[in-house]
Image: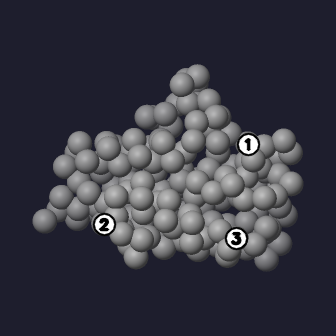
Amino acid sequence: MDIRIGHGYDVHKLVEGRRLVLGGVDVPFEFGLLGHSDADVLLHAVSDALLGAAGLGDIGRHFPDTSGEFKDIDSRILLRRVVELIKLSGYTVSNVDATIIMQRPKLAAFIPKMTENIAADCNIPVDRVNVKATTEEHLGFTGEGLGVSAHSVCIIKK
């Protein structure tokens, strides 16, 4: 059996006039994330982890911000396309672990739905996805509320 691990990282700036979408969930907040797509930092990190594990580059390579096709696109659509690319390479997703880093709002109430969305889009059971959220104790750009970042690791297998 061929087992591979991948790591993904993404960051987006918080701005007025945009929705805050994390893990495919609309999170009520006065700011949203700036980006070409819906700027779902969590799903972008998960997608990059999966692509990295398969040696397929990153989401910028597959879904460039220079293409109008991806303007304001739902990142769940992108994640499902990534999973198809993984499948075409002969792999399946085994598990996903991810962390969202932001000062506020608190995300605990939204994490179960984020976990369900990722599991559904990766075609794996919910118990193979783990999503966490943490703050940076008011340190750095995330701690100051200027942006949101996310890390993800995954295992894929053939």
Kind of residue at badge 3: Leu
Q: Is residue 147 left or right of residue 65?
A: right
Crowd class of label 3 (few under 14; some 14 to 19; many from 20; radius 10 Å): some
Marks 1, 3: nearer the viewer: 3
Mark 3–mark 2 Cα distance, whole angstroms, equals 25 Å
Horizontal side of residue 26 vs 51, given as left or right:
right
Q: Which mark is residue 107?
A: 3
Residue 21 percent coordinates (x, y): 67, 52
Say which amino acid is labelled 2.
Ser
Q: Which mark is residue 34?
A: 1
Residue 96 circle label: none
Label 1 vs 3, first from the N-terminus? 1
Residue at which label 2 appears: 94
Looking at the rendered image, the quarter that the N terminus falls into is bottom left
Mark 3 near mark 2, Cβ–Cβ under 8 Å?
no
| One can see residue 60 in this view | yes
Q: Residue drawn 39% across and 64% down? A: 154
